């Protein structure tokens, strides 16, 4: 079986911090929260909760008015992030040879897809009394909108597909894109995820599950506290993140900057409960990822945890890490960047994968914010990073995504050799 090396040559995102990937990572290293307080006048009951919003993002400026008009929020965020990754990889400098791009793929992840478009349609009909809806409603609402637009705009003739696996959606998309490049089915793959979660129906649904952390204008920045003894739930967020995965030899031949390497992917199902996580299922995904990467627990220098700050989820994840890493676990650096950028649902895996690649590239580990002095005893047993650590020699790292439905996905990345920078 062919096992080609897979280079990471492009990174892009739309984040609540604004700016590019370097700006994003500096905020994470400093432990700065992007969580604010959302208040609306929605009927029948206004919304008020901690939320992470990309308020500075202008889709028309990023995409142009004609293209932006054909999309709703999750596609705006995703296509803009992917365009950034494409430019970061320097692919726009290559000749626009469509024949050459016949095996170039776009594989995307989203949990909610175009739910905003459909919610708007329902409101227009039942609340505003409109008899006719926009003819763009269906194409704006379809979950494959991002990969469809990207394939058309960038001339990608290979596989174009989307994955919807709840909070593991974009990690699964990245993993499946990795497999296609490694096997030789694709030379280049643009992959990642996006979700626009700021809808009344979505917020109310999560609120009904009693999984949303409470807060007000003063306390919202610290509302998401993974692994903390006083954690009270997750904070919803929106955004998009993208990676360009590329055949290593192809990247070297065109003189691309290699920012990291993807070396493994593992997935599993808990097969036990729709919303209650299981340490055994998560451990199987972790073990599968290490086997796929041909690495041992001693080779891993950092884990970007799923870490949602739910009462049940956090201890289960730590238990899975302890099971897989054994004697290595107490010295294994672990952090949950959701504490700062919130839970982007289907985009969570992508933004956390990007943070993990940047950690390896910069040899620095972002913290779990708001944790110092508050660690839940049930979450002990690993090296929790409570302040950003710079100048940390790292070879390889994991990014965890564990979803409703029991779907687990673990991505493995390695630092690029210094001569490729």
Image: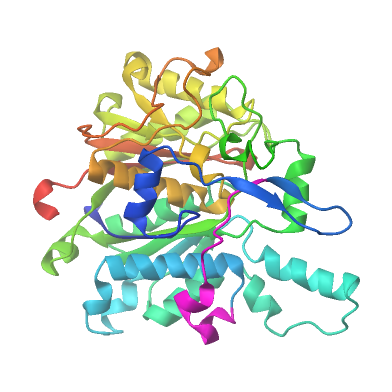
The image position of residue 63, as x and y in percent, is 47, 78
Hey, which quadrant is residue 271 in on the image? top right
Viewer-proximal residue among 66 and 345:
66
- Depth order, front residue of 110/33: 33
Image point 65% across, 47% down: which residue?
A: 37
Magenta highlight on residue 51:
yes
Vertical side of 48 occupied by 187: above or below: below
**From where the camera sits, is residue 181 visible?**
yes
Rendered position, 229 above or below 114: above
Quadrant hosting residue 120: bottom right
Which residue is at 46% across, 28% downward?
A: 283
Q: Quadrant of the C terminus?
A: bottom left
Q: Position of residue 408 (x, y in %)?
A: 52, 39
Q: Is residue 185 magenta?
A: no
Q: Could you tell me residue 390's position as x and y percent?
A: 26, 34
- Residue 12, placed above or below residue 146: above
The boundaries of the magenta stretch are 50-70
Q: Is residue 88 above or below residue 352?
A: below
Task: Residue 300: give x, y in percent of width and height.
Answer: 29, 30
The residue located at (82%, 53%) in the rendering is: 46
Q: How many marks?
A: 0
Q: Which residue occupies 68% across, 51% down?
A: 38
Q: Does the rendering let one see residue 165?
A: no
């Amino acid at each position: 079986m062919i096992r080609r090396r897979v280079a990471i040559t492009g990174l892009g995102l739309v984040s609540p911090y604004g700016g590019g990937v370097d700006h994003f990572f500096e905020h994470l290293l400093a432990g700065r929260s992007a969580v604010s307080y959302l208040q609306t006048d929605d009927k029948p009951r206004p919304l008020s909760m901690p939320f992470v919003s990309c308020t500075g993002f202008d889709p028309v400026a990023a995409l142009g008015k004609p293209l932006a008009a054909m999309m709703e929020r999750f596609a705006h965020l995703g296509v803009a992030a992917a365009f950034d990754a494409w430019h970061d990889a320097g692919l726009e400098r290559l000749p626009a040879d469509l024949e050459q791009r016949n095996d170039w793929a776009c594989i995307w992840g989203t949990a909610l897809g175009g739910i905003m478009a459909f919610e708007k349609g329902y409101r227009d009909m039942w609340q505003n009394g409109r008899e006719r809806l926009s003819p763009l409603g269906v194409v704006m609402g379809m979950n494959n909108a991002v990969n469809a637009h990207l394939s058309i705009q960038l001339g990608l003739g290979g596989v174009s597909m989307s994955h919807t696996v709840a909070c593991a959606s974009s990690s699964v998309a990245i993993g499946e894109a990795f497999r296609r490049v490694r096997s030789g089915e694709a030379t280049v793959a643009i992959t990642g995820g996006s979700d626009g979660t700021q809808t009344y129906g979505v917020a109310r649904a999560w609120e009904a599950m009693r999984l949303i952390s409470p807060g007000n204008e003063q306390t919202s920045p610290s509302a998401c506290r993974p692994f903390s003894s006083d954690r009270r739930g997750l904070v919803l967020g929106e955004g998009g993140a993208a990676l360009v995965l590329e055949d290593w030899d192809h990247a070297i031949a065109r003189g691309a900057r290699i920012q990291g390497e993807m070396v493994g992917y593992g997935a599993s199902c808990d097969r036990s409960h729709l919303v209650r996580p299981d340490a055994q299922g998560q451990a199987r995904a972790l073990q599968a990822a290490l086997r796929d990467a041909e690495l041992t627990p001693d080779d891993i220098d950092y884990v970007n945890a799923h870490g949602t700050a739910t009462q049940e989820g956090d201890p289960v994840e730590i238990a899975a890490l302890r099971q897989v890493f054994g004697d290595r676990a107490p010295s294994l650096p672990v952090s949950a960047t959701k504490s700062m950028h919130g839970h982007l649902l289907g985009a969570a895996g992508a933004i956390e994968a990007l943070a993990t690649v940047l950690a390896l590239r910069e040899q620095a580990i972002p913290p779990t914010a708001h944790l110092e002095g508050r660690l839940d005893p049930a979450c002990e047993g690993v090296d929790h990073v409570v302040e950003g650590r710079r100048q940390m020699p790292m070879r390889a790292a994991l990014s965890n995504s564990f979803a409703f439905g029991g779907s687990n996905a673990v991505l493995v990345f390695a630092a690029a050799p210094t001569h490729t920078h």
